[in-house]
Image (spheres, rainbow, N blue to C red):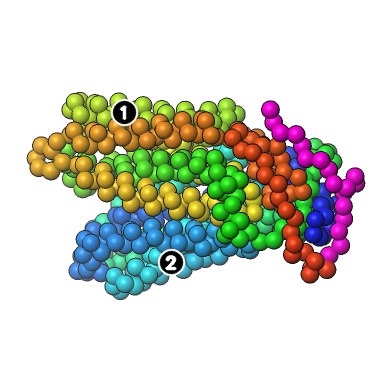
Amino acid sequence: MTEHALEEGKAIPSLVPARMDRLPWTRFHWMIVVGLGVSWILDGLEIQLVSLVGNVLKESQTLGLTTAQVGLLASIYLAGEVVGALFFGRLTDRWGRRNLFIITLMVYLLASGAAGLTWDFWSMAVCRFIAGMGIGGEYAAINSAIDELIPSKYRGRVDIGVNGTYWGGALIGSAIGLVFLNDDLVPIEWGWRLCFLIGPVMGLMIIYLRRHIPESPRWLMTHGRVAEAEATVDRIEETVRRQGGELREVRDDEAINLIDYPPVTYREIARVMLRDYRSRSFLGFSMMVTQAFLYNAIFFTYALVLKAYFGLNDSSIALYFFPFAIGNLAGPLLLGHFFDTIGRRKMILATYATSAVVLFVTALLFNAGALNAVTLTGLWCVVFFFASAGASSAYLTVSEIFPIELRGQAISFFFAISQLTGGVVAPFLFASLIGEGDNPARGPLTAGYIVGAVVMLVGGLIAWFFGVDAEQQSLENVATPLSARERASSTRFQGTTPRLPSTKANDRGITPIVPNGGDQEDPPKDT
């Protein structure tokens, strides 16, 4: 395709989405998965190591922190993630995916490494907040890039699998903690500092790989850089052919017609999410909040439960984390491909509902005193085998059901909501339900587990009725870009909304190229 530029109200056709979606799976796509997917491993590693380091930081040979300060560090990291997601999510939609996934990784590397050199609470707090900003920004930039670079046939399983690798990072963090925080092996004043350097070392190995990952051609296409988008796809196709991939011809009728569209304002975001896509916003909010509520409720209190009701000591509890994390990791990896084959809505309902039913049964057995620490942990593994795949599908859902021009910001908004609701409300609520004394009451915690099961079931039902059948569909068919000349036909519960062309193209000095036939009629609505 020859070089095109966009002018006010003038549309040009682009085959970029069709060309990207028809690519076969090759080593190029593994480079995307490894280079970008490390973000979730780093987040799991960070959170798990810091939770293990907490007690060490209270020692006089280290920073001598109080218990309250240790707890506050976790909240500061969470706040950094929320701020980073919102700040960098805005930038990734304006500056591009590649620019941001390099910047956010560098922010994390520098801040996390600096945390190992801190000397008091406040220096540590600043480093943890900035490291959290880097990881929060990664969520927005990386989810956007993965969705836009991975072919539609594989998008669901890749996104879900990558999100699930958070638990791989948590497993690595636990294993490292057993070594570096063992003062028989590493002096206490050095062990905790080395823990903060593990993530940056892993990140440094990934920086080189990310330098070879291209900018999203879809982002270039919708930001007036059509020729650059086509050239990027040319290079990707050449790489795929060298790696043995066979490419089918792309038909002209697969093209998408584009007009120039100005940068999306906050008012426009509000209009799109609260008016044009309000049912999808309700879907994203419901899925993210329900999974976060269940996850954080149990994950942040499981150690308290094992200690209060089964009398385990801290060293024994640490070993119970491994099967818990393995179940969480296995679910997305083993179930992810079914979200592309069986379908999004069916699998979301199945994973949410199954985890709810197993948690309900667990609650009844727990209340009856029929479980010990091993059997309770085993049931939690089953619950989160399904819940982890469901939670990962929530991140997949919010990353693919909104137009590309605000994809990063949509991800960041829902990520912030889930972190604040699940990370603040649920742990506090469930911790308050755990009984005191030698024989604590089980009734309040049982009721909490039942509430968690109901919440997950409701989330699954909402996804069933309001969800989008996005499996193996082009992102542009799931949510038509704001810069598209015609609005695609509506999806379930989502009416069409006409768009006005940009009024900011005249000052760019660009030449319009109008597709043959001029303006086309809007396609009919689905019946």
Q: Residue at x 47, y 44 (%)?
A: 285
Earlier in the chain: of badge 1 and badge 2, it is 2
Q: Quadrant of the C terminus?
A: top right
Instruction: Find residue 250 and report its horizontal and vertical position in percent.
Output: 81, 40
- Give the answer, above or below, for where 268 lies relative to 396: below
Residue sitting farthest toward the right: 516
Quarter-of-image position of residue 210: bottom right
Residue 236 makes an appearance in the image: no
Instruction: Identify the residue at image location x=31%, y=62%.
Output: 73
In the foreground, 289 or 303 = 289
- Mark 1 closeness class: few <14, some 14–19, many ≥20 residues within 10 Å: many
Q: What stretch of residues is rendered in magenta?
A: 510-527
**Magenta span has 121?**
no
Taking the image as drawn, is residue 81 in sight?
Answer: yes
Please give the residue where the numbered disc 1 appears in the rendered image: 360
Q: Amino acid at mark 1?
A: Phe
Q: CA distance from mark 1 to mark 2?
A: 39 Å
Say which element carries label 1.
helix
Residue 120 falls in image quadrant:
bottom left
Tell me which secondary structure the magenta stretch mostly adopts. Answer: loop
Residue, x 29% and y 47% (percent of image)? 427
Residue 155 at what x, y percent from top left? Answer: 61, 40
Amino acid type at image mark 2: Ile
Residue at image coords 21%, 45%: 432
Viewer-side residue, 189 vs 160: 160
Image check: 233 left or right of 473?
A: right
x, y percentage for residue 327? Answer: 39, 36
369 sits left or right of 379 in the view: left
Taking the magenta stretch, the answer to whether it contains residue 522 is: yes
Mark 2 is surrounded, within 10 Å at the Cα level, by few (under 14), some (14 to 19) or many (20 or more) other residues, namely many
> What residue is disc 2 on?
130
